[in-house]
Amino acid sequence: MPRPLITLTTDFGLRDPSVGSMKGVILSIFQDVTLVDLTHAIPPHAIASASYILGMASRYFPPGSIHVAVVDPGVGSARRPVVCSAGGQRYVGPDNGLFADICRRDPQWESFELAETRYCLKAPRLSPTFQGRDVFAPAAAWLARGTAPNAFGPRVTDLVGMESPKAGRGPDRRGSSLQDGEIIWVDRFGNLITGIEPSPGATDYVVSIGGKDVPLVTHYEEGPANAPAALVNSDGLVEVFVNRGDAARTLGASIGTPVALIPRRRAT
Amino acid sequence: MPRPLITLTTDFGLRDPSVGSMKGVILSIFQDVTLVDLTHAIPPHAIASASYILGMASRYFPPGSIHVAVVDPGVGSARRPVVCSAGGQRYVGPDNGLFADICRRDPQWESFELAETRYCLKAPRLSPTFQGRDVFAPAAAWLARGTAPNAFGPRVTDLVGMESPKAGRGPDRRGSSLQDGEIIWVDRFGNLITGIEPSPGATDYVVSIGGKDVPLVTHYEEGPANAPAALVNSDGLVEVFVNRGDAARTLGASIGTPVALIPRRRAT
Amino acid sequence: MPRPLITLTTDFGLRDPSVGSMKGVILSIFQDVTLVDLTHAIPPHAIASASYILGMASRYFPPGSIHVAVVDPGVGSARRPVVCSAGGQRYVGPDNGLFADICRRDPQWESFELAETRYCLKAPRLSPTFQGRDVFAPAAAWLARGTAPNAFGPRVTDLVGMESPKAGRGPDRRGSSLQDGEIIWVDRFGNLITGIEPSPGATDYVVSIGGKDVPLVTHYEEGPANAPAALVNSDGLVEVFVNRGDAARTLGASIGTPVALIPRRRAT
């Protein structure tokens, strides 16, 4: 049997020892596991960005991998801790919308509440403010050890965020866009990742952002020097970039900036 | 037998390949080991902060884990490299006060000097300036392989920092505090971790910091919006925070700022 | 058989999930591998800095380790993906000069093009812009699984950068230097690492940088307070530092600043 695999995604950063403590808890319960950091640089409390990163990265992991995600503004209040299964992967974290997009893509998704305290950290004193270490890390380790998801607690059928379909995919105000959305991530090079996955076959468009129409190309090297261009990136999403430059700085764009695909013949 | 576990804590950061080189040295001596980074973002030469982080995080690791800590302003000069055993964990690093707090908590602590050169890196040229790679990493790997601590060199009974009891726990100048101390860590969210562990049963107090008295609450969500509050955090220490805000910025506080617990009836 | 070891060196940073995705791809092909990050903080597109870091760190890893390096301004254009063997280690990445210095040190070096698409990621859609995940990560995993380097494609004998001997090692303009070079890395403490490896036996020199001559000492503690000094560092390279200070700031130096070793009797 291959060694189980647990990934970690948080807004804890790498300065603090929070991530290290979570790994200690996991390895105390089950030592024969491979641990992988997805990212710990989610902006504080940015549930939507974390959901995007998690969905993008987890698809590259072997079936049965366990992904712990802790971006949790409501820690200590009433939201439920959950385990979800979807797309052949397993997810552990707070029920605050983090897993809704991932579950919506798989009609077979299921989820259970992490209610059984016997799967939580056994400490002299459990903390109301660090469920990542006390609840989510141990649950991931018990899953890796073979505990079935439904052993943790009652089935959850009303996952937060599942009811509302993802916003911002209809035509924009101008009535002329094929699809629209917004910037959901700015990467290290200042590339602007949009939430727009172009419809199959759509190729004859430009990308409208911040009042500018930027051309669609095939790879980064094709972009004009010092001017923005767009491509469909390695995750299938429209991405705006400046060849060897910084698109976020050039366009003054950031997470939340609106974007639309406009048919090329009508481009202004 | 479970796979041995080695953690790393340094002030090297993650830009430089220093941490990677240490891991290469460890894996060259013993390949079947799990490596975990605690943090590499200790402020340069901040022995006290490293000692805090190490003590907080190591308690979540399985018994017998090996913790390498390299925060070492005196590298190349005369201080001794040591291995310490305390609280069921093992520690490797310079004898400069890093391990004093940890050993003070366990009357059974013991320590040995890393004197045997046969357990050091075999290089064409050993460096006087990178003992993390040349001395501490190999010692940790040999421990993981099963070498007994007393095989590395003579017993150390006068560990640096053991003689002086921890300062700053008596009453403050005003004569009215239950306990006082200072900020020893500022986390990513600007939360201010103090060195104060409240006496059992003490609950009827406010926290005095920078001339302000801030109320004690139970979890982050209970704190008033945009105003500082305090709680006993997941490590049992008093922590000052601003609900969904940044306490370090709000209070102008940083590592070293004095803090005191004041009885509530006397709060100003 | 010991578990295979794969290291990763990129300019991706740790904010984005790129590194996590590469690890997912590797672990999907071969799960029983140890993954180590060398650094993901190479300045964007800085091939020379990456080459230095890779050469310095990889020598500390066990024979047969696999080092994936992705610093790749030309991704999506015509440069070849390659695997190289040199110095008992294996390297995977773009043929853009990254591996030339490493191969030049070993007359037995060999290299093969990663041409066989069956060793690439099997995705619904392969990306022209993320060969780190789609080509280099899978190749490393197949090497770890035992695939021979020559199974990936045709032999490469004209590796980019091999023809030109390393520049900047001759005497400088003043005609008085023993050796000269430039700053190739600035570490976290502001220490300035030069590309100069002093000739065996050369000890009677000072280091000239930015119009200043700084003295040569043996270890950091020997340097005068608040003034620059130089030593031969743990990698055998001349390094300029300020004892408990920041040499980059003190001297206004950065990557690319020229440096020379000047005989001591002639020092101004």
Image: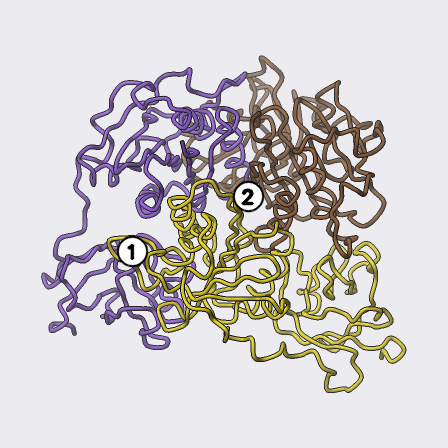
Chain colours: A yellow, B purple, C brown
The residue that mark 2 highlights is: B15
**Numbered label attached to residue C161:** none
Residue that sits furthest to the left in the current view: B175
Q: How busy is the neighbourhood of tag 1: few (under 14 within 10 Å), some, or many (20 plus)?
A: many
Residue A55 lies in what quarter of the image?
A: bottom right
> Callout 1: helix, strand or loop?
strand
Q: Amino acid at mark 1?
A: Ile
Instruction: Residue C166: tell me if it is visible.
Output: yes
Task: Give the mark nearest the N terminus, 2 or 1.
Answer: 2
Chain name for mark 2 = B
Chain name for mark 1 = B
The answer to which of B41 and A172 lies nearer the viewer is A172
The residue that mark 1 highlights is: B183
Q: Amino acid at mark 2?
A: Arg
Tell me which residue sits at (45%, 27%) in the image. Answer: B129
Q: Residue B179 location, x and y as percent?
A: 15, 58
